[in-house]
Image (cartoon, helix red, strand yellow):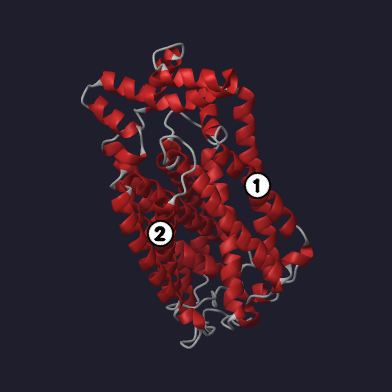
Amino acid sequence: MSDASTTLRKPVMIPEDNPWASRWKLAFAVAGVGALMVGYGATMDPKRFAFSWLFAFAAVMTMALGTIFVVLIQHLTSANWSVTIRRTAEFYARGIWMLPLLFIPIAGNVTTLYPWWDVASDQGHGDHGAAHAQAGEHAEPGHEAHGAAGHGDEGGHEAHEGGHGDHGPEHAYHAAILQKKLVFLDAGGFWWARQLVYFLVFIWLGFWTLGLSKKQDETGDKQLTVQMQRKATYGTILYALSLTFAGFDWIMSLEPNWFSTMFGVRVFASGAVLGWAIVILTAMSLKANGVVGNQINVEHFHDLGKLMFGFLVFWAYISFSEFFLIWYASIPEETIYFHRRWDHPSWQMISVGLVVFKFIVPFYLAMSRNVKRNSSGIVLAAAWVCGMHFVEMYYWVMPYAADNQDLQMGGIEFILDLGSVLCTVGIYLGFVWWRMTKSSVIAVNDPRIQRSLDFVNA
């Protein structure tokens, strides 16, 4: 291989007549359709809009964070085999710049989304009685479910109707728990400051992962590889902390009396599986449309398939471990999360469906070596994982959208759910795919590229 500092490889650009050259326009057009649907639905049901948008935002957030992890792990391990596919993940990592824009509707609906928000505001004004009452009120749905499970439907109904009956002590206990959490769940500057920190970290990660790699395309400077590896070390620490606490703030605090020390890991695991799947689908499409030729080949897809499969197993392990520990301890303030998703037939069906279709089906689909080395097979497995990821994000957020806790999928609800997905995903993908037309889709002057081109699976 020639010295990268003196001989530069030619960038691999998307030709103007290639379908990928205009794909970003299609994504933005889809986002426009979604915006019209959301605009109409939000006037009909503002509360549902807030939750639908948060669900879609969570899907995009985990998509962007998952691809950032794909980039970070390549630098941390000094991987040779993945040099030619790394740029694909770098484009999606840069797309995290869209998160602050997509967060605006959430910032404007915090009082609708988070039941602790008004409680924290009241506490800030010294109204501890209101905080206590509201905290107890929010605990009732979980206790209604818990009572139904432990004492039959009638007992659960009585517990719900009699807010000051036998379950009064538990309500007071939950109110006390929430009071302690309000040190963290602060509706004032502390909460907003954390959001700023998250986005600054995310934007910084998206900036250098693509920026330094692009600079190496232009200069061939091998020291940039060393810089990226160094940044990846402390970048991974910042990534893990910001991802974990953002998951607490944006999703776990929807149920302020519930807590799980494993939830941040579950957010990471879901994003990681999706990250590998997104890279597989995009790289395969670039190859099928003649953009990358044999620079990305079956050997690379084989390893991508192994990593997607491995992190799928990790996601299942984390999800089951969280459930098993909560079930075994049977502490009411922990079990309310699963009662909310099990005591109603519609959510019970989705709970079982996630086990079967998010894990068991893709587990057997992607386990075979032959599937990983077959373009149709690995694309099917990756697409399946992507589709089920949206179901999982729906499962995380939408049980809180309706007062009766059952799944609501009427006309307006469907319009808002679908419109939010089309709008957020369309904006994110539109930016990512537009950025792909401006740079080489292969990190052509990485000093290890020849090893990546010559890579053969064991």
Query: According to the image, label 1 marks what residue?
Result: 314
**In this view, the mark in front (1 or 2):** 2
> Residue 349's image quarter?
top right
Say left or right for 203 vs 329.
Answer: left
Measure how far apart labels 1 and 2 are at the Cα level: 31 Å
Residue 83 lies in quadrant:
bottom right
Secondary structure category for the residue under label 2:
helix
Pick the residue in front: 16 or 55. Answer: 55
Give the image location of residue 151, x and y in percent. Answer: 58, 18
Residue at the farthest bottom position: 17
Label 1 secondary element: helix
The amino acid on which the numbered mark 2 sits, given as a three-letter code, is: Gly
The residue at 73%/59% (across/down) is: 365
Disc 2 crowd rating (10 Å Cα; few below 14, some 14-19, many 20+) is: many
What is the number of the mark on residue 258? none
Q: Please tell me which residue is depicted at 40% across the width and 76% down the height of the picture.
A: 25
In the rendered image of this protein, does residue 439 appear above or below residue 425?
below
Which residue lies at the image location 45% right of the left edge and 16% below the top edge? 170
Three-letter code for the amino acid on which mark 1 is drawn: Phe
Pointer 1 local density, CA inside 10 Å: few below 14, some 14–19, many at least 20: some
Disc number placed over residue 419 in the picture, else none: 2
Residue 26's place in the image compared with 7, above or below, is above
Q: Nearer the viewer, residue 55 or 401?
A: 401
The disc, 1 or 2, on the residue closer to the chain's N-terminal end is 1
State whether residue 3 appears in this view.
yes
In this picture, residue 344 sits left or right of residue 311: left
Name the quarter where the N terminus is drawn. Answer: bottom right
Query: Can residue 76 be seen at all in this image of the molecule?
Result: no
Which residue is located at x 42 percent, y 39 percent?
402
Place of residue 358 in the rendered image (x, y in percent of width and height, measured from the top left): 63, 50
Q: Residue 107: percent from the left, percent from the top?
A: 30, 47
Question: Residue 311 at x, y = what percent?
Answer: 64, 52
